[in-house]
Amino acid sequence: MGMFDSLIIPCLFCKKEIEEQTKNGPCDLKYYKWDDADLPVWMMETFNDTEIECYHCERTFRIVFNFEVVVRDRRLETVDNLSMLELEQMRKEEEEQGG
């Protein structure tokens, strides 16, 4: 059995939970709810603007995440040309350097 991560989304119509799986992240069998404050950027990018079909009521809807970038230093003021994954990589590099 392969490893994956899951996003739990409530159906917009029947309100039952739907599990969407992905292998785009670390694949450590974690479950994330769509409204978790600590939802990883890679998970949002994976499912952003994705059509989801509910396997309970068989209706479809689209999930869209709104990204917000908070400027903490001048280096991040020009983030409009960077993807969210690049921003996350920059954040990780800063943490590793003790910044």
Image: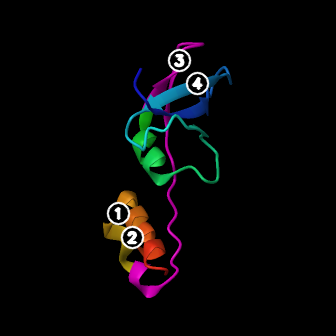
Foreground mark, 2 or 3, reads 2
- List x then y, in percent, for residue 37: 64, 53
Q: Quadrant of residue 84?
A: bottom left
Dots 2, 1 in contact, CB < 8 A: yes
- Residue under the image location 48 percent in, 84 percent down: 73
Dots 2, 3 in contact, CB < 8 A: no
The three-letter code of the residue at mark 1 reads Glu
Residue ID for mark 2:
90
- List x then y, in percent, for residue 89: 38, 64
> What span is in magenta?
51-76
Q: CA distance from mark 2 to mark 1?
A: 6 Å
Q: CA distance from mark 2 to mark 3?
A: 39 Å
Disc 4, SS: strand
Residue ID for mark 4:
18
Disc 1, SS: helix
Q: Is residue 1 left or right of residue 40?
A: left
Residue at far right of view:
15
